[in-house]
Amino acid sequence: MEYDERLARFRQGHANPFDRSEVTDAPRNGECACEDTFHCMPELFPSDTKTQSSERPMDLGLAEDHFSRPVGSFVASDIEQLKQTIEECKRLILELPEHSERQKDTVVKLIHLRLKLQELKDPEEDEPNLRVLLEHRFSKEKSKSVKQTCDKCSAIIWGLIQTWYTCTGCYYRCHSKCMNLITKPCVRSKVSHQSEYELNICPEIGLDRQDYRCAECRSPISLRGVPSEARQCDYTGQYYCGSCHWNDAAIVPARVIHNWEFEPRKVCRSSLRYLALMISRPVLKLKEVNPLLFNFVEELVEIRKLRQDILLMKPYFLTCKEAMEARLLLQLQDRQHFVENDDMYSLQDLIDISTGRLSCSLTEIHTVFAKHIKLDCERCQAKGFVCELCKEGDILFPFDSHTSVCQECSAVFHRDCYYDNSTTCPRCARLTERKHEPLDP
């Protein structure tokens, strides 16, 4: 039977392409009539039958069943024999014509043999499910098909034949064999202890100040690429080697705050993880860092007004049973800082402002809140104000656009009636008189 026919039957699950039991032409005069590549190789696996002799040709043991677990356990000699078979298979791959069908089939067999070797070693039984190292909390991954890259050696993680771990804090991925070589501490610990951004744009100090070494692993680097290419991180301004800087791109907070620029820049791996963990943290106080930004970005002014209104609505919800049962404030659970202050922003807030996404969602939430207070809830309506200056018009609320609020007593008036500097607040005057009234004997 021809090789191609046997290969077709193998792929259909009927035969092994390397099994010589189906070869019809018997060898003559001590010569083999078979053209199989795996012909006449020394026997690597001993046989238990007396009819077999050491002179029988062996096809690297590939015709044997290495792909199902046998009864009993393997001893060390069996593993060593399988390793020898793998080495012979690798040698044959190099000798066969490049891109030939036999070479491709041999590569498939090599993969299966390695899988079997990995199965015999049972690495998963020895590897713990959780490992703690340099504040990393590594969890052993169960996925076998997702293609990942080791952050330590920069090589591909073959989940089918390799054990790998992921840090649950900063998502650092690495092979099991690379665990003891890790020198980078968990970035999440830095986020917990130092929740602030570098707000200078690419603060470069020069490669000579780094002693021509990577800022992280201290390996030699140079701008000419000898021995390793120096790559600059736009966030830290420092230079890194190819193992610590993969040319990943991220939005840099300093460029957003000072230039309102959202173009991703190349950053090192540690900066990429740090920015990813910090992106939702409200640590940017724009009034202090760059107050002029509100003069040039109209969307920021709109968002600030909406946030101020929501803070004025918050007391109504905290004292309203219906609002508490409806959990209206939970509509802002992804941006909890919006119900705590009006001046702190996260990098994600600024990104969503630039795309218009935040304006749409916050306007919708603002409408729902105002509808509950002014239309749906009688208790909240009863907490409205009547302008004491003109005593006309509808019930006023502090978040209405045509009202002014006294900074002392929080009374609400029409904006046309009340001026902060020239108008006396009737409510404040009434409260002052009560303080000076003599007590009854």
Image: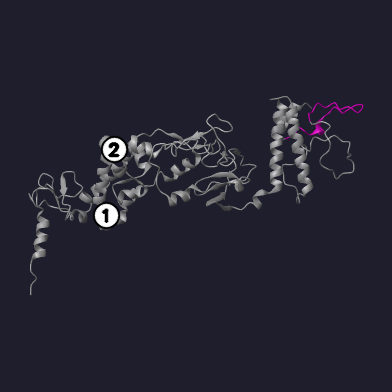
- Whether residue 361 appears in magenta in the rendering, the answer is no
Along the horizontal axis of the image, is 2 left or right of 54? Answer: left
Query: Does the magenta segment cover residue 32?
Result: yes
Mark positioned earlier in the residue sequence (1 or 2): 2
Res 48 quadrant in image: top right
Q: CA distance from mark 1 to mark 2?
A: 32 Å
Mark number displayed over residue 27: none
Quarter of the image with the N terminus is: top right
Callout 1: few (<14), some (14-19), or many (20+) C-alpha neighbours within 10 Å? many
Image x and y of residue 341, in percent: 29, 50
Badge 2 amino acid: Leu
Q: Is residue 98 above or below residue 316?
A: above
Quarter of the figure that contains the C terminus:
bottom left
Residue 269 visible (yes or no): yes
Region rendered in magenta: 14-37
Q: How is the image coloured?
A: one colour
Image point (58%, 44%), residue name: 174
| Percent of width and height locating residue 168 | 51, 49
Q: Nearer the viewer, residue 151 or 86?
A: 151
Residue that label 2 marks? 293
Circles 1 and 2: CB distance less than 8 Å?
A: no
Using the image as rendered, state which of residue 231 and residue 414 is in the foreground: 231
Extreme residue in the right direction: 29
Judging from the image, what secondary structure is the residue with disc 2 in? helix
Q: Amino acid at mark 1?
A: Phe
Disc on res. 317: 1
